[in-house]
Image: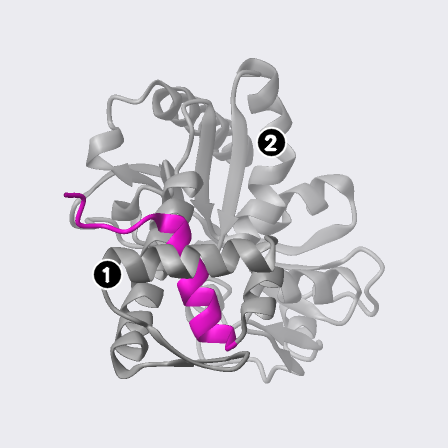
């Protein structure tokens, strides 16, 4: 004997128990009232007991029915979540990439058309987020993250180092021309970027800026600079395209290393993946071109 009742009967029962009405359950499941009533009779026949007390047109759950409804609701929820996770897993020709939002916006997005031109068979899905997403759930093929490396249970490839530099909008006035003028300029700060190393490299070891604005999001910081609100220390990967386009300018030529490099990481089980090999080779090449360009 099959120990499980029909799924349709369970769905109908859960809907009636949750909504308190055959009419509402039928509307929720887009079936007729008679279909719901039939499913309830089927389930009660399967179980050999009544799940409802019938008082005229009212249906009241028995105590056994109330407990069963809670467990059925949980089981159906688990099934829905498992189905959604399975549907969300990358398909053979999908590449799903976890990435820091600022890096995705300012560095990766402008380069993705080149990847698509070389590998038209792939669909690229970006999942932007600041958190370190668990890669054991199979929802990501790989991720681009900043950090110190040595993440347990993950394969990792150093992608590139990062530097920070002082920038302003091309139209920002008065634009500092000397280090003395830097010290009196309007400053936009980001807590993720410390000024200590830059000040030491600039010979201003005893000076620290008093920011007029502080933003804990790199995209907000870059946009505020672009709008001409002030000068800021920013990561080169986020501003290099704007500097090349002429909308942002370097205040000085001083660049200092950022404490966290970029890494390409992926689950160990994905190491033999063709799409991982294709995307890794492409993005490592892009990173090398970027680093060589800034060093030339």
Name the N-terminal-most of marks 1 and 2.
1
Q: Which mark, by number, is residue 111?
A: 2
Q: Is residue 151 left or right of residue 7?
A: left
**Which element is circle 1 on?**
helix
For the question of whether residue 113 can be seen, the reply is yes
For the rendered model, the colour scheme is one colour
> Residue 17, located in which quarter of the rendered image?
bottom left
Could you say where residue 61 lies in the image, as x and y percent from the top left? 37, 80
Start and end of the magenta stretch?
A: 1-20
**Separation of marks 1 and 2 at Cα, in angstroms:** 60 Å
Give the residue displayed 33% in from the left and 49% down from the top.
82
Give the residue displayed 59% in from the left and 85% down from the top.
210
For the question of whether residue 10 can be seen, the reply is no
Judged by its main secondary structure, the magenta piece is helix
In this view, the residue in front, 81 or 196, is 81
According to the picture, the residue beneath numbered tag 1 turns out to be 47
Q: Is residue 289 left or right of residue 1?
A: right
Magenta run includes residue 281: no
């Amino acid at each position: 004997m099959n120990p499980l009742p029909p799924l349709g009967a369970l769905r109908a029962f859960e809907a009636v128990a949750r909504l308190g009405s055959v009419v509402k359950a039928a509307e929720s499941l887009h079936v007729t009232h008679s279909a719901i009533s039939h499913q309830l009779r089927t389930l009660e026949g399967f179980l050999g007991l009544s799940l409802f007390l019938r008082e005229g047109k009212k249906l009241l759950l028995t105590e056994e029915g109330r407990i069963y409804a809670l467990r059925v609701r949980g089981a159906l929820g688990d099934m829905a979540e498992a189905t959604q996770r399975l549907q969300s897993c990358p398909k053979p020709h999908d590449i799903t990439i976890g990435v820091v939002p600022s890096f995705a916006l300012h560095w990766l997005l402008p380069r993705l058309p080149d990847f698509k031109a070389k590998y038209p068979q792939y669909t690229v899905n970006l999942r932007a987020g600041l958190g370190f997403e668990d890669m054991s759930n199979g929802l990501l093929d790989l991720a681009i993250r900043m950090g110190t490396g040595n993440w347990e249970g993950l394969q990792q490839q150093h992608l590139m180092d990062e530097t920070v530099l002082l920038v302003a909008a091309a139209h920002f006035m008065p634009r500092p021309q000397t280090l003395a003028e830097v010290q009196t300029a309007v400053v936009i700060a980001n807590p993720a970027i410390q000024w200590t190393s830059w000040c030491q490299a600039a010979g201003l070891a005893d000076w620290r800026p008093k920011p007029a604005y502080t933003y804990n999001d790199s995209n907000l910081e870059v946009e505020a600079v672009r709008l001409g609100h002030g000068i800021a220390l920013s990561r080169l990967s986020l501003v290099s395209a704007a500097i090349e386009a002429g909308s942002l300018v370097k205040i000085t030529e001083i660049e200092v290393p950022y404490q966290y490099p970029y890494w390409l990481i992926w689950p160990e089980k994905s190491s033999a993946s063709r799409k991982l090999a294709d995307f890794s080779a492409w993005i490592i090449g892009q990173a090398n071109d970027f680093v060589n360009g800034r060093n030339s």
